[in-house]
Amino acid sequence: MRKLNVTVLILASAAFAATLSPAGAAQDGSGRAPFERLCAERGGPSHHPELAGRLAEYLDLNDAQKAAFKEFHDTRKKSIEDAKTTLCANKPDLSSFEARLVFGQAFLEARLNALKAENPKLIAFYNSLDVRQKEKFDRFRERSGRE
């Protein structure tokens, strides 16, 4: 699990580094810098509640599992909102390479803190599933391209 999280962080950092380059901002099409894209209001939550609802329905959860899933989902939502609040509190100066690296590091640290908050709840939820549900959960996450 730890190796998986490290791999996810490496991939996220590579993807984020590409968006931090001046060329990356131009290719985006939005013409906005990474900070604006990250901190913009998107007209809805960034934790994909519809996907969570589909997963819960797909797994056919019992009441105890629904409670564990809700606890995980609420923790995930809060960790994402906290990370966004932390990162978006002050607009960084991204004009230099060094400043972009510092912002990228802050982004990854915020995501790591979110994972540390989320993972115990996700593990507790996963452990509440029976073998059939775990197989379905694993397939669902593979299809979703998740860690």
Image (cartoon, rainbow, N blue to C red):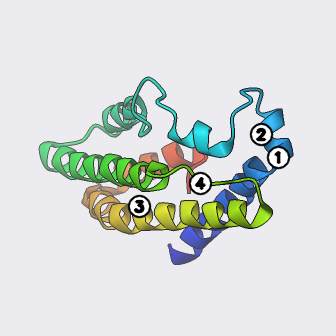
Q: Choose mark 2 or mark 4, whichever is in front.
A: 4
Q: Of the residues shown, which amino acid type is indicated by label 1?
A: Pro
Q: Of the residues shown, which amino acid type is indicated by label 2?
A: Ala
What residue would you read off at disc 4?
Answer: 92
Question: What residue sits 47% from the left and 62% below the top?
Answer: 110
Q: Characterize the local packing of mark 2: few (<14), some (14-19) or many (20 or more) Cα atoms within 10 angstroms.
A: some
Could you say which is closer to the camera, residue 126 or residue 10?
10
> Which image quarter: residue 7?
bottom right
Q: Earlier in the sequence, mark 2 or mark 3?
A: 2
The CA distance from mark 2 to mark 3 is 25 Å
The CA distance from mark 1 to mark 3 is 27 Å
Rendered location of residue 104, percent (x, y): 64, 61
Q: Choose mark 4 or mark 3, whichever is in front.
A: 4
Q: Can residue 11 be seen in this view?
A: yes
The CA distance from mark 4 to mark 3 is 21 Å
What residue would you read off at disc 1?
Answer: 22
Residue contact between numbered discs 1 and 2, judged by CB atoms under 8 Å = yes
- Looking at the image, residue 123 sits to the left or right of residue 139; the answer is left
Q: Earlier in the sequence, mark 4 or mark 1?
A: 1
Element under disc 4? loop
What residue would you read off at disc 2?
Answer: 25
What residue would you read off at disc 3?
Answer: 114
Rendered location of residue 40, percent (x, y): 52, 34
Residue contact between numbered discs 1 and 3, judged by CB atoms under 8 Å = no
